[in-house]
Amino acid sequence: MFKKVQLIVLTIVCFLFLSSCEKTEFLEDVVFDNSLLNGISFNVAEKEINIIYESTFNEPFVDHVMVTSPTARVISWLENNINNFGTMNKIAIDIQKASITRKEIVSKVEVKGIIKKQNEYLYEIIFEILYFLYNDSNQILATTKAEVFRSTTSSQFISLNERNLILDNITLEALRDLSNKSVELLKVHMSEYVL
């Protein structure tokens, strides 16, 4: 009888212990598919992509910790989604900025009348792209600048995998914004040369 009670108590304790464990959350990888982003075609003979932005290893910049940097993502999008055809003129695209920064911020959260300070990281991404349309004599016919800014926050104590997913997510969202903004501005400022 005593062994049955012990077995029942042990079973209940094990059940309570296992049911109180936190569920494991599996985060899905971010998929970068340029075919899902906007594209545009120019009636020009040549397309030139210039990288003006230089990545830095200093704080607060964190683009160097990513497997594929934001600059590489922008270059991939420009190569795949900005198309050229024609026999005259040239489109030059300058990548001015493609950086992600991380800054520590302290936020105050009030829980039941008690003010609690909470350390978080603020991630900010900036894309700045200049488009120049040149004629065959190398004179500028039109220019436009597309600039995108996004930010997000996270807890200070997250895993490296969660940090990488946050960086990839913010990069993808900013790249979507950049593709939309670029198409919008190019159709306004270079409408004669855009399909």
Image: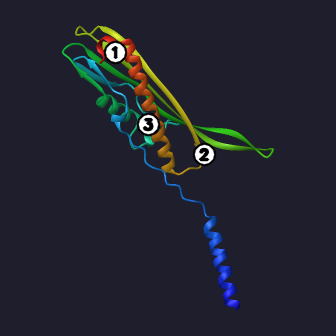
Q: Is residue 139 above or below residue 160?
A: above
| Amino acid type assigned to the residue bearing label 2 in the image | Ser
Label whose residue precedes the other's in the sequence (1 or 3) = 1
Q: Residue at x 52, y 31 (%)?
A: 150
Q: Is residue 182 above or below residue 22?
A: above
Front position in the image: 19 or 69 = 19
**Quadrant in the rendering for residue 133:** top left
Q: Mark 2: which secondary structure? A: strand
Mark 1 closeness class: few <14, some 14–19, many ≥20 residues within 10 Å: some
- Residue at the spot of label 2: 155
| Amino acid type assigned to the residue bearing label 1 in the image | Phe
Do the CB atoms of the residues marked 3 and 2 lie less than 8 Å apart? no
Residue 26 appears in the figure: yes
Do the CB atoms of the residues marked 2 and 1 lie less than 8 Å apart? no
Q: Quadrant of the C terminus?
A: top left
Residue 129 appears in the figure: no
Mark 3 closeness class: few <14, some 14–19, many ≥20 residues within 10 Å: many
- Residue at the spot of label 3: 172
Percent across and percent down for residue 26 are 49, 54
Between the C-alphas of marks 1 and 3, the distance is 25 Å
Between the C-alphas of marks 2 and 1, the distance is 41 Å
Between the C-alphas of marks 3 and 2, the distance is 20 Å
Q: Residue at x 41, y 35 (%)?
A: 70
Left or right relative to 162: residue 114: right
- Residue at the spot of label 1: 132
What numbered label is drawn on residue 107?
none
